[in-house]
Amino acid sequence: MNERRGIGDRGRTLKQMLEDNERLYQETGCYAGIVEPRLLREDPVRAELFHSRIMAALIAGRETTRMISGSPYVREVAELCIGLYTPEGDNIAQSTGIQVHIRLMGDNIQWMVRNNYEEEVGIEEGDLFIANDPVISGVHAADVYDMLPIFHDGELVGWVCTVIMEVDIGAVSPGCMPTPNVERGTDGLKFCCEKVGSKDRLRRDFEHKISISLDMSDIFLLDRKGAIAANIRVREEIRNIIREFGLEYFKGATRELIEEERRNQMARIRQRTVPGRYRDVVPAEFPMANQPVSWVPANRDVIRLIPIQMDILPSGRIVLDFEGTGEWGWHPFNATPKALWGGLSISVVQTLSYDGRANLGSLLPFEIKEPPVDSLLNPSQVRQLATSTMWSPLLDIYGLWMGMLGAAFYLRGFREETFNMRSSSGWQMYGYDQYGTKRPLMLSPLGNFGPGATGVCDGVDNAGWVATPETDMGSVEVWELFAPHLDFTRRFEPYSVGYGRFRSGLAIPTMYMPHGSRQMVASGAIGCAHDRIIPNLGLFGGYPGGRRNTILVRYANYQELLEKRQPLLCEIGDPREFGQQIQGEVLFLDHVLPPVEVHEGDLMIADNAAAGGLGDPIDRSPASVVSDLDEGLATEWMARNVYCVGVSYDDETKTWRTDEAETKRLREAKRKERLARGVPVKEWWQQARQRFMARSFDDRIVEMYRSSASLSQTFAQEVKDFWALPDNFAL
Amino acid sequence: MGSDKRVQIIASDAGGTMTDMMVVDSEGNFTIGKAATTPEDQSVGFWESLIDAFEYWDTDFQEEAGRILPGVEAVVYSGTSMMNTLLTATGRKVGVITQRGDEDVFLHERSRQTWAGYPYQDILHHVTHRHNRPLVPKRLVKGVTGRIDMFTMEAIPLYEDEVRRSVEELLDEGVDAIAVCLLYSYMNPAHELRVAEIASEVMKKRGREVPVYLSHKLAPIMREQGRLNTVVLHAYAAEPGREQLFRIEEKLKGSGYRYPLQIVLSHGGLTDIRYPRIHEACFSGPIGGLLGARYLAQEMGTGNWVCTDMGGTSFDVGLIMGGEPMMEREVVITRRIYNIPTLLMDTIGAGTGMYVTIDPITNRIKIGPESAGAEPGPVCYEMGNEVPTVMDCCLIMGILNPDNYLGGKLKLNKELALNAIKEKCADVLHVDPYYLAEGVYRLINSSMREHIRAVLYARGFSPADYHLLSYGGAGPMHVAGYTEGLPFKGVATLPWAAAFSSFGCAAVDISHRYQKSTGVIIPDGAEDSWKLMMGQMMLNAGWEELEKLAAADFAAEGLPWEEARVQQIAYVRYGGQMEDLQVVSPVARINSPEDMDRLIATFEDLYEKVYAGVAKHPQAGYQIMELGLTATVPKVKPRLPRLPLEGKEPAKEAIKGEREVYINGRWHRATIYDMDTLRPGNEIEGIAVVEAPATTFFIPPARRARMDEWSLLWLG
C-alpha cells in the first residue's frame, strides 16, 4: 500500500518530521541530530548574512503590524511579536517585542502537527490559522496567534507566526483578562488552531462571527489584518531568501541556527554563573471570597506556595523544579506547564540571549520538571478551568527567578548583570466609553514598575517589566482617548522602593478618575495587587520593594474642592498617613477587588511597587541618598532610619546636605541595634518550631502547607525534616 | 576667479567638527569649502569655510567679500549646533510648568526613552537601559492643577494661584525662559494661554521678563511627552542657537549681503532665521542629502529614490516618493521623543569607524555597535587605537588607498591595520586575515542592505520602483555591496558625494509647514450630508486657519503669498487605527460629498499600495485626527549642469594606475581612476576603484559604472 506523500521534507508528513526530530535529539543530545553545525562553521560570513536576512524580514513584518493595528497595546506599548518556525514548529528567529512566545507559538504549530491537521484539516498555501487557547499553548487567551505556512515548490518549509495582545476577546467583563471568572466559558472566545482563511484572505464567516461576538470587533479584525499582512510579507521574503541561498541551505542552516544557539547558551551559562542549587519561593494569593461568581464553591481565599528550585549544572544546563507547588483552584490563575516556558523565554532573552540570536536553542539547555499533577501549574482538568489570568503567578515566578539567576551571575563576578523584576497592580474598567459604546476599557500601562537594583548601580526608575524588554507607559493623551478617565499622577512613589546599598528603580502609582462615561465598573487588573505577603526580592542584604495595593477614594466633596481650588490628591505620600486629609471614603482594597461601580469624583489608585534592593542599605553612599532627597525620590525619614545618613535641608540653596559625623553615629547605632535584636539561629529555630507545631498561623497559611503537602511527599518530608516534626504530624 | 559669473547662492552645512560650504554661481557652477566648526561663535567657522571655498576659484574672499556678497541672492544655513547644545547639555536655564502630578516628567520620561535608539541587542538587554539626564532639573518643574479633557472641555478649572506661585518660584530661581505644556493644549489651549497671561502679570510686577513658550504654539500635536520635549528643546537649545545665526547674518550684512539668512528646517522647508518655530531647524543636519536628492529627482524627472548616506558611525536611509521625501511627525533623536515633523531618516549604526571584534562566547564576528570615531579613529590612523575597524578592513583589501585619504592629507598605516586584524580577529577564528576583512566588508554591507529592505518592505514598497542614490564619505565605497541583489531601477553616486548635504541645502525652496489636530469621523456608509458637514466644518475650517497662519508668516518675511504653492494635507486612518497615512488632498476644499469621497479614495489607494489589499478595513469607517498644510515659493537654486555625453573611454589622465584588491576570496588587479577627471559618457569596467579626495567609489568584478549627462555615476 502506498503511503500518503506528506507536505514536508522529502515527502515526509509534518508529524513524521516532528517525530524524527525528537528522536534525533534524544539520540544525540543535539537539536535535529546536528552534531557538527557544518554550514555555519564552514562559511561563518555567509551564515551571518543568512541570519541577518531573516531578522530583517521579521523586524520589517513587525513594523507593518504596528502600522495597521487598532490596539493601543500595539502602538503605545508594543505588545506584539513575530517569529519564524521550522515545519515542525521550532523557533528559528524572533523579532523584538514580547518574546514570551518563542516556544509558545511553536507549541501551537506542534499541536496542529500532532493532531494531524495535514490530513484532517488540510494545510495549504495561503491558509490562515489562529489560536489563543492556553490549554494548547499561551499565557492567556488575550494573546492571539496568527499562523501562516510557508510553502516552496509545494513543500512546507516553515511557518511565520505573529502574536498580538487583544483588548477584547469576549470574556466576561472586562473582556480580556477578567479576574472574577472561574469557569472556562467566561474566558472569552477560544480559537484552538482554527483555519479562518485561505488564499491569504480571512473568511467572511469568520469576520461575521467576530463582528457579532466582540464589542471591539473592528480592533480585533484590524489586528488580524495587520498580522496577516506582516506574515505574508515575511513569507515572501523567506521565499526570496530561499531563492538566494538555496532550499537545502535554508533547511540546513535554519536548524543549525537552533543547535548553534543551544551550544552558545550553554557556554554563556558556564561562563556567567556559578553552578549549584538556588532556591526561593513565591507565595501566590488568590482572594476570591468576595468575587461575584456563578460557581459558588469558588468563593474562598487561598494562598498557594510555589517553591522554585534552580539547579545550574557544570555542563551549562539548568533544571527548574516546582515541586511543592499547591493545588489548582476555582479561579482564573491556573497555569500550565507550557505557559511556564513563556515566562522563561522572556526572562532568558533579557538576561542571557540578548544578542539577537534567541530562538528555541536558547531554551534547550533548560529543563522544566513537570510540576506536580493537579497543582496550580499543572491542573489535569485544565479544560474545565478558567485560565484567563495565569500570567499573574507566572510574572511573580519569573520576576523572582531573574533574581536567582542574578545571584548566580553575581557570584561569578558579573555583578552588573544582576537584577530582578516586580509585576503590576492595577485597575481595569469596563462600561460605556466616552462615545456611548459599552465595551472593555482595560488599562495597564507597562512602564510604571520599578525593576530591582543591579550589583553596580540602582535599578532604572519605572522602566523594567518581566514581560517585555521594551517597557513603555505610553501617552496620557492616547490612553484617555481610549478609555474615559482622567489620569491624576505620574509622580514617583518613594515608598515603592526596595532599599539597599543600591536601591531598586522606583514605581509610579496610577490614579484614574472616571470621566465622560455614563456607567463604569472597575475591578483589579491581572490580580497581583494583593501583597499581604511580599515576595522577597531583596538580594545580598537588600530589602524587598514596597507593598502593592489598590485603593479606592470616593471624594464626598469633589465639586467643592474644585470650586474652592483646594488641592486634589496626586501622590500616595507616607502610606501611614494616606487619606487623612480626604473627605469621603478611603477603601484599602488589598486584594483582587470585586467589581465595583465607579463615578466621576472617585479615584482608582494602584500603588505599584518595585522589586528589591541589593546590599545593606546602611552601605548606601550618602551622596546617593542626598541626590534622591533633592529629586523627591526619598524622604528624610528614609535617610535617617533606613540608610542611616545624617541630613539637613539648606533653605538658601534649597538642597539637602549630609553630616558625616551624624552618619557615622547613626550607622554605628544601627549595627548595635541589630546585634541587640539578633538571637542565635538555634534559638530562633526553636521558637519558630513551636509556632509551627501549634499551627499558630492564619488559616490560609495552614491550608497552604496542607495543599502543597497533599501533592508532594518530597515537599512534606522536607518541611518535616527542617522543623524536626514528628512522623505523625499532619501538615 | 575660477568662475566669472556672479555668485548666487551660498549654502553651509555646519557639522559637529567641520563646516562644509557650497558656493554656486549664476551658471550653476559650484565650489566646495571646508573649515573647522567654531562652536563658541559659529560665524568664524562659517567665514573660514567661505574663504576655503573661494580659494578653489582663486579668489581671496576675505578681500573681496564686499564685492561678492551684495550680489548673492540666498545664504542658507544648516547645521548641528542646536543638536550639539542638547548633547553637551549646555543650553539655557529653563523652567517648566506642567500638569500637577507630572512634576517628575523628566525623571520618568516615557520609559521608552530608556532604550529608544539602542541597537537591537541592547534593547533586549535590560541592564543597559538608562534614563536621559534631565535638561531641566526637578526643582525647576512646577505642576499646576487644571485639566482640559479629551473632548477639549475644561474638566478641572485652572488653579491660578498655583500658576502665580510657580512663576514666582521659577523667577526666584533665575530661569532664562519658561516652557509650558499642558494636556490637550493642542486641541484647546485655554489653560496654556491663561498661564502665559498670569506669567506676564507676575513678571511685570517683578520687573523681570523672560520669554514664555507654549506647547500648543510650537508643536500642536498629540502625545504630551513629545510636545513637552519639543517646547523645552525650543527654549533650551533652539533660541540660544538663533543668536548664533544672527551673528552670521550680521557678519554677512556687514559685507553687503542684502537678505535675511535662511535656515533649513527638518521637514525640508527653508525659512528666515526669525521664524518662530526655530526648533524645527534643530535636526536638519542629516537631511541635506535628502533635499539634494529631491532636487535631483525633480531635475532629472525620476520620482522615487532611496537615499543612502554612510559615514563613520551611521547609515541613514531616506525615501523620496513621487518627488517628495517621506515625513515622520514624531521622531526619536538623541534618545528623546519630539513632535517635530522631520524627513524620514531611518538610521542604524553601520559606519566605517565601527569596531570589529570576535565574541568570546560564540566566536561570532561582531561589528560595532561602538565606533572609533574621529579620535582615536581606526587603527590605520596611528592614533593609539588597537581594535580593528571596518575601515581598516577596506584598507587591507586594497579598496582604500593609504595615500589618498582626505586627498592625501592623512597617511594610513596599512601594516598596522593588517596586524590588528590578524591578531585580534583572524587568528582567533583560525582564518586568513584577508578572508576575515572581506567577511567584515560583506557583513556590514549586508546589514545596510537589510536595513534598506526593512525600510522599504515595512512600508510595503519594492526596490523595483526606486532608484538608489549613495552619498556620504563612505557610501560609494560600499554601495555595490549594500545594493547587491536588490532589484533597484538604478544605483547611482556622485563625484561630490561627500558634500552632497550642503548641495541639498543650496537646492531647497522656501517652504513652511503647518499642522493642527482635528476630529473627522466618517462611519462606513455615512450619509452625504454628514460627509459634507465634516468636510466643511472640520477640514475646510482647519485648512483656512492654517492658510491664515501661513499668509501671516509669509507677510512677516516679505514673501509673496500669492505666488505660494499650497498643499492641503489630511492624515487619514480607518476607524480605530492608531496610525494614519499622510494624504495630499486632491481638492483644496471639500465642497461636496464627492470631494470627501475623492479624499477617501486617495487614502484607499495609498493604503493598498503600502499595506496590501488584505489589510483594508473600510467597514470600520474613516478618521482624520490631524491636518497639515505646506506653502512653498521657489528660490534660486544651483543649476545642475547637464553636459553632453562624450566617449565611453575615459581619458588617459583619468587613469591613476593599478592596485591589487582582495575580493571574492582572491586578489584582483584593479584599475584606479581619478573621479574628477572622468567625463559624462565615460564607462568603467570592474574591477576598478574611482578615487576623489573625500570619497572612494568601488566597482567590483563583473560590474561596471557609467557617468551620465548629470555627472552621476551609475553602477551597472
Image: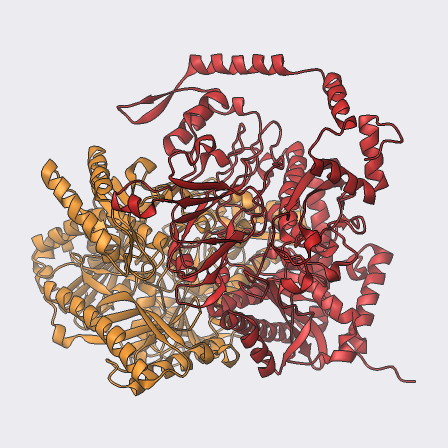
Chain colours: A red, B orange
Query: In this rendering, would B402 be left or right of B539?
Result: right
Rendered location of residue B105, percent (x, y): 37, 44
Rendered location of residue A291, percent (x, y): 61, 52
At 11% from the left edge and 72% from the top edge, which residue is drawn? Answer: B560
Q: Pick whichever, B164 or A397, lies toward us.
A: B164
At 48% from the left edge and 38% from the top edge, which residue is drawn? Answer: A506
Query: In this rendering, would A31 be left or right of A130?
Result: right
At 44% from the left edge and 68% from the top edge, which residue is drawn? Answer: A437
Q: Quadrant of the N terminus of chain A?
A: bottom right
- Work out whether residue B705 can be spotted: yes
Residue B290: which quarter of the image? bottom left
Rendered location of residue B236, percent (x, y): 26, 45
Rendered location of residue B703, percent (x, y): 51, 74
Seen in the picture, residue A123 relative to B162 is either above or below; the reply is: below
Residue B570: which quarter of the image? bottom left
Q: Pick whichever, B598 or A608, lies toward us.
A: A608
Seen in the picture, residue B25 relative to A631 is either above or below; the reply is: below
Seen in the picture, residue A364 relative to A713 is either above or below; the reply is: below
- Work out whether residue B668 can be spotted: no
At 39% from the left edge and 78% from the top edge, which residue is drawn? Answer: B523
Query: In this rendering, would A235 be left or right of A562?
Result: right
